[in-house]
């Protein structure tokens, strides 16, 4: 198999060791003669896999006991609906900070269920985008919760400090979960689609504080009702069992590596390496204010954008895949999730340097 590095924003690359193990036990899971995906979700073998995955995630993120962990359907966008359905009933109103395109989409969805106040949008000064400073936020006193997206996958912008607000903090961590240490106790609810840093698509993780469960609007679909999901250990209906199993293998891999502190240092090294190269180049540039640049999704542009197609074609031929930026922003994007080794970033920088010289 030829060496390629997959920089796709999602579904994204998974750790090579995890894929190899999954392949090895695909048709015969631990000597049972059937695949893990062929077990009933009620079977004690699968239940054990499921419980172990949850425990490993709890260990990795240091999740306090008064938080439930749900393994849900519907990806990130499913939670764009589930969050307001479950929480907005508390006051009928919620605050949303817009940091980029995903949080903007979350607002559109939430508006179906209650009054949504956009507290601020990103600003552009001298061609550099930044997240609005907290001093400019227009908070509502009676919001049921404050929603934000710390890492905007499309825009390549990331916010490293938690907002200081008096209402439950809700975060879409789809593209940054497990990439750096966070203090779960500062949040009311965290959710993440799996296909960036956790596993295959089809699964999303919800980490929710006990007191925020049990307030769902009557019209909430059962599979999105946190109370029902929690009471049934995320098995009110058939969960995405294979995705759950693979997520569990990714959690084991990360634990063996040394956990989130260790991967955070590696992620910092990877993204610094690429940003430093971009900043010292007069061929490439980045449009995000330096202190808010994403560690997971590095966006960059070519000063001569007529070379974009050539850049992408040659990168692809060199085994550097999926570098095209999101269609809404153009340019390039290199997603450096946990599974991307440093060697992949070095290969990318070598290619970029070579291309610019040629
Ligand atoms: C990918 C992504 C989503 C959407 O996830 P789906 O599973 O496609 O619904 C939402 N938020 C963020 C931050 C993402 O990166």
Image (tube, helix red, strand yellow):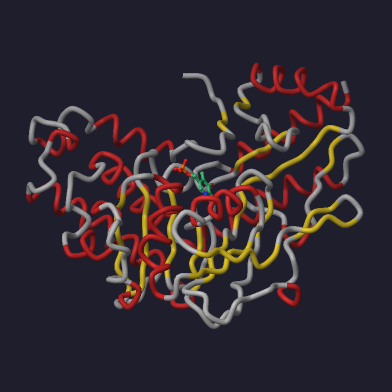
In this rendering, position of residue 294 left or right of residue 133: left
What residue lies at 29% left-to-right and 68% top-to-bottom?
A: 68
Q: In which image quadrant can residue 90 be found?
A: bottom left
Quadrant into which the C terminus falls = top right
Percent position (x, y) of residue 233?
19, 60
In this picture, is 242 found above or below 51? above
Residue 258, can we see it? no
Depth check: give the residue in front, 163 or 110. Answer: 110
Percent position (x, y) of residue 7?
59, 35
What residue lies at 45% left-to-right and 70% top-to-bottom?
A: 92
In this picture, is 194 found above or below 135? above
Q: How many marks?
A: 0
Q: In which image quadrant can residue 319 be found?
A: top right
Depth check: give the residue in front, 139 or 69. Answer: 139
What residue lies at 57% left-to-right and 69% top-to-bottom?
A: 95
In this rendering, position of residue 136 left or right of residue 296: right
């Amino acid at each position: 198999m030829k060496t390629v590095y997959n920089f796709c924003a999602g579904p994204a690359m998974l750790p090579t060791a995890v894929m190899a193990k999954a392949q090895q036990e695909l048709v015969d899971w631990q000597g049972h003669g059937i695949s893990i995906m062929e077990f009933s979700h009620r079977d004690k073998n699968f239940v054990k896999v499921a419980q172990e995955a949850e425990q490993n995630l709890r260990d990795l993120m240091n999740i306090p006991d008064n938080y439930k962990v749900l393994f849900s359907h519907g990806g990130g966008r499913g939670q764009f609906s589930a969050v307001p359905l479950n929480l907005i009933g508390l006051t009928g109103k919620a605050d949303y900070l817009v940091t980029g395109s995903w949080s903007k989409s979350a607002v559109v969805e939430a508006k179906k269920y209650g009054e949504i106040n956009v507290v601020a949008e990103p600003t552009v000064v001298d061609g550099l985008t930044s997240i609005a400073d907290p001093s400019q936020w227009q908070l509502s006193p009676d919001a049921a919760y404050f929603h934000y997206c710390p890492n905007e996958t499309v825009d390549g912008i990331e916010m490293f400090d938690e907002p200081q607000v008096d209402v439950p903090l809700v975060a879409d961590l789809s593209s940054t979960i497990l990439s750096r240490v966070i203090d779960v106790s500062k949040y009311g609810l965290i959710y993440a689609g799996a296909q960036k840093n956790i596993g295959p698509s089809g699964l999303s993780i919800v980490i929710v504080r006990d007191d925020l469960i049990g307030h769902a609007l009557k019209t909430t679909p059962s599979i999105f009702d946190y109370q029902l999901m929690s009471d049934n250990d995320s098995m009110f209906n058939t969960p995405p069992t294979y995705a759950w199993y693979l997520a569990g293998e990714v959690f084991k891999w990360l634990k063996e590596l040394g956990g989130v502190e260790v991967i955070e240092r590696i992620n910092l090294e990877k993204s610094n390496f690429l940003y430093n190269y971009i900043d010292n180049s007069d061929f490439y540039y980045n449009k995000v204010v330096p202190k808010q640049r994403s560690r997971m999704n590095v966006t960059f542009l070519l000063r001569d954008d007529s070379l974009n197609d050539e850049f992408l074609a040659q990168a692809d031929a060199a085994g550097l895949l999926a570098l095209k930026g999101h269609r809404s922003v153009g340019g390039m994007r290199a997603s450096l999730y946990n599974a991307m080794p440093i060697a992949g970033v070095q290969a990318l920088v070598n290619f970029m340097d070579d291309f610019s010289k040629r």
